[in-house]
Image: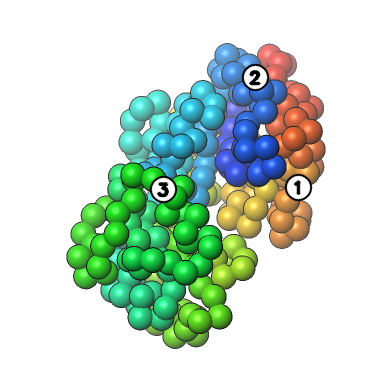
Amino acid sequence: MSKRKALFFDIDGTLLSEVTKIVPESAKKAISIARSLGHLVYINTGRSYGEIGQVRDIAEVDGWLCGCGTYAESEGRTILNRLMPVEQVQRIARLAVDCDADIFLEGPGVCYYCSKSGRMPFGQQLRKNFGNTIEWLEPETVCGEVNKFCLLTDEQSDRVGLFRNLDLDIAVIDRGEGFYECVPEGFTKATAIDVILEAYGLTLEDAYVFGDSTNDIAMFEHVPNAVLMGRHSPELEPYASFLTKTVEQDGIWYAMEKLGLLSEDV
């Protein structure tokens, strides 16, 4: 086992407080200390690379793993970018619109939506969050780079028809309340971790993951050193090796200190 470790952080509810909407200074300091000791630090997020503009400055890190394992950048170099075939994207986008669901196509650059005016509040909020990195397109005209997509549904949506006709090679993560994160089969937050570990000659025992929600399950199942935030989805509990405090209670600093990641004696 190497003295050098690789640390992988989810964003929302892990680094970024969903209460205060900021990253605690203690978390930023902990990451800075860890990097000064030679450890590698990555953001491992469900957001696509095209969506991280608003959070790019939340902490100084060595790289970004985006789109639930479909994109990886380390030290300024892109080492993974798995794109969905254009024909598949167009077919799925048309299916979503026909089933009265809101769809967001997420990629390394521009992201797209295919319903001009989403009636669902969360969809309206996402349109605002994306800002100028999102464009509206008819399903048949989507031809840009897409890594993954999200579906928003409500009682008016034909969920049965939507998921019955969705391609079998798409893995669906149920985030609750009609929100689904959809990723090409075989790509997860865990597979992106393996890409980084292989690039730096590190093992799973050298990795530490930090998360709180259901789209973190893949990396919690995969990595033995799994830090669970104080406020979390209960589905993660069977895989956690360390339960820390909430974001607002300086949970990142607490865990990293207790696990010896802030000293040279790891």
- Whether 164 is drawn above or below 247: the answer is below
Report the amino acid beneath label 1.
Arg
Could you tell me if residue 123 is visible in this image?
Answer: yes
Q: Where is residue 244 in the image (x, y as percent from the top left)?
A: 78, 38
Could you tell me if residue 69 is visible in this image?
Answer: no
Report the amino acid beneath label 3.
Phe
Disc 3 to disc 2: CB gap under 8 Å: no
Instruction: Give the residue at x 78% y 44%.
Output: 230
Say which quarter of the image contains residue 143. Answer: bottom left
Numbered tag placed on residue 231 in the rendering: 1
Of the two numbered discs 1 and 2 on the same chain, state the one appearing first in sequence.
2
Say which quarter of the image contains residue 91. Answer: bottom left
Disc 1 to disc 2: CB gap under 8 Å: no
Numbered tag placed on residue 50 in the rendering: none
- Describe residue 139's horizontal placement relative to residue 156 as left or right: left
Of the two numbered discs 3 and 2 on the same chain, state the one appearing first in sequence.
2
Numbered tag placed on residue 130 in the rendering: 3
> Does dot 3 land on a helix, a strand or a loop?
helix
- Whether 191 is drawn above or below 252: the answer is below
Quarter of the picture containing the N terminus is top right
Say which quarter of the image contains residue 246. Answer: top right
Disc 3 to disc 1: CB gap under 8 Å: no
Which of the two residues, 198 or 69, is positioned nearer the viewer here?
69
- Describe residue 145's horizontal placement relative to residue 168 as left or right: left
Report the amino acid beneath label 2.
Lys
Instruction: Give the residue at x 73% y 27%.
Output: 253
State how far apart marks 1 and 2 are (Cα): 21 Å
Which residue is labeled 2 in the image? 29
Mark 3 or mark 2: which is in front?
3
